[in-house]
Amino acid sequence: MGDQSSSASGGNGGDEDPSLRELLECPICLITMHPPIYQCKNGHPLCSACKSKVGNQCPTCRQELGDIRCLVLEKVAEKFKHSCKYQSSGCPEVLPYSIKSKHEEQCSFRPFNCPYPRCSVVGNISFLVAHLKDSHNGRTSNGCSYSERYIITYETGFQDRTWKPVVFHCYGHYFCLFFESFHLSGSPIYLAYVRFMGEDNEARKYSYGLAVKTNGRKMTWEGIPRSIRDSHESIRDSLDGFMIHSDMATFFFEEDIMRVACWILQEQQTAGNTSAEETRDQKLENLCHGIVELSHKGSDLKILFKISPMKSRKPRVDNPAHFLPSA
């Protein structure tokens, strides 16, 4: 299931004396010991993990174990280097034990968390793509554009809900589109957003946008897809996505149909290029118009999604006036 860890100590970090490493081998689990290392009154050592399993009796001489630390072996252990526990997943780092744990917390080879809300599964990207499809009924698509339908029913009233995710592969990466409805401080809202299935530094190379337009009104959103390293809670709490209050959403319904456009356009190399901005705005206008025609039939909410790499991006617009419907 995704990335699996090697043993905590892993491999040898250099030309250390093999006989010294043998001294650090726990007689119970045979894994290289690291601080804290314990010993009985007769000097028989064992690792902290095994100590918690054997009770208060030394497994070698059956004497009382106690909480005596073997400081000599701990100092020896600190001189040795250890492979990252994600070595089997490709990490080449060999580190002193004192910084090994800190590295592993940020290691780029560590498994990812499933981006689906409230799912605790972890694994590598290929595993999570299959997991989203098999366990969360997600749809998958190859290519950088996707059109998805989300059916919204008001007959039973507004409900907290997460629609099926859409996972698509383009530019050598996977992206995941989510759409949710939930209550924020008692107020019902919709939130659509895109996750990048990879590291944050890669996610920042792309941007995405969403828009709704109908009845002479339009709302738009532009942002950066958040890496799945970020928790679902951090996105939901920060509302980092296209948020529409349920009351405002009624301005964009026609017979319970909401038309949403989602896209990522390639940015021009020169920031602030007026003609480039006009070209992008015209593409957005055409896209919004096109989605209205595409969604005209059927009682559903429909999202068109397109991704392109970016060279630069505009900062997030914080002026609330940009998000208010206009006549």
Image (cartoon, helix red, strand yellow):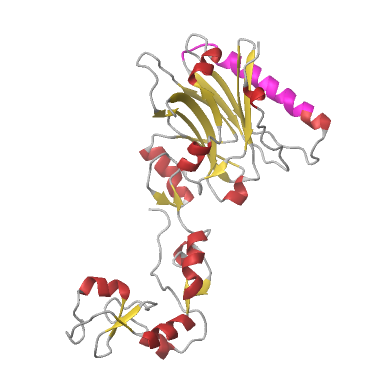
Q: Is residue 299 left or right of residue 202?
A: left
Asked whether the viewer can see residue 302, the reply is yes
Determine if the magenta segment contains residue 37.
no
Point 67% across, 28% down: residue: 319
Q: Is residue 223 above or below residue 230?
A: above
Residue 97 in picture, x, y percent from top left: 47, 75
Figure check: 212 above or below 241: above
Q: Which residues are magenta?
A: 278-299
In this rendering, would 243 be left or right of 62? right
Please name the residue shown 81% across and 40% down the image.
Answer: 270
What residue appears at the point 67 percent right and 41 percent down from the top-left corner? Answer: 309
Give the residue at x 27% y 74%. Answer: 50
Q: In the image shown, does 209 or 138 lie closer to the viewer?
A: 209
Residue furthest left as drawn: 62
Q: Main secondary structure of the magenta part?
A: helix
Residue 23, horizontal then vertical, whole percent: 36, 87
Residue at far front of view:
185
Q: Name the side, left or right, on which 232 lies relative to 61.
A: right
Q: Position of residue 85 (x, y in %)?
A: 44, 67
